[in-house]
Image (tube, helix red, strand yellow):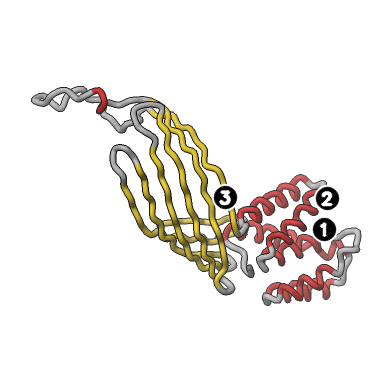
Amino acid sequence: MRTASSHLLCAIVLLLSLSTHVTAQTGLDPNTMGQARVLRVAGEYDAAVDILRQFFAHPKDTGVREELGYVLILDGQMAAAQYQFEILRERSTDPQLRGLYSAVLRRIIDERPVGISVIFGATPTSNLNHGTDNTTLGSDGGDITPESRRISGWQRRIGLRGYVRGNIGAKGRVVFDWRAQRHLYSTLNEPETETELGLSFSQVNQQSDIGARVFRTDRRRERGNYSRAGVTFFGGKETAPGKLINGFL
């Protein structure tokens, strides 16, 4: 995997702000560090990594690890990048830097190629059955049955969701995602089962991304099954260091 997605853009921009003190912290030859950065900008990540790994014996290697972690993220080596930032967070005594390293680690974990998570929720509602407060159908109508009037209660959700990610070329990404959950009600309605499958494609650049997702949702319920399918379009843009605008349609 040779690219970092938009979810890591904010972290990468913050890391760039840290890279200015690499030479001061390590005492390394500025020309050598400059060479590593030139290779990184040119996309020669393997060569940049080789240069940076040469200096880990130095007692002040914090700046080198930051730069190396940055290069590894750009190269898509998330596990290796995670290792470097875990070391940085463990050794740092600066609360601000520890917070930054923790934020980067959370984003790296979000970029794992395969993931699965549990869905669980309980929501109170004053209108469980989407009923009405009216008692009659109008001046000339009859009474509305109790079952059609608003009923309060709880709705619970339990299930699983997951995804599989992959890259297409240097900047393309494809994601298959799925969801299966059970809806449980405190009264009135029988349990319902809902499933969804999705497939998305996106183009990821250094400061932006754009893509589309096709999906299909099926819901099986006593009051009538239904299905829906559609397409959503999404995008994001880095407008300033640490600021990311996202949108979808």
Q: Quadrant of residue 44?
A: bottom right
Q: CA distance from mark 1 to mark 2?
A: 9 Å
Residue drawn at 40 percent across, 42 percent down: 193
Write down the residue under mark 2. 91
Q: Position of residue 170 (x, y in %)?
A: 59, 73
Instruction: Please tell me whether mark 2 sits on a helix, a strand or a loop.
Output: helix
Hey, which residue is sitting farthest left in the picture? 140
Nearest the viewer among 135 and 197 is: 197
Q: Earlier in the sequence, mark 1 or mark 2?
A: 1
List the residue tagged with mark 3. 116
Which kind of residue does numbered mark 1 sit on? Thr
Query: Viewed as shown, does residue 94 lie left or right of 162?
Result: right
Q: Position of residue 216 (x, y in %)?
A: 38, 55
The residue where tag 1 is placed is 62
Question: Residue 191 versus residue 208: which sits nearer the camera?
Answer: 191
Quadrant of image for the C terminus = bottom left
Label 1 residue SS: helix
Q: Residue at x 43, y 56 (%)?
A: 248
Q: Position of residue 189 (x, y in %)?
A: 34, 31
Secondary structure under tag 3 reads strand
Residue at image location 53% in from the left, 52% down from the top:
162
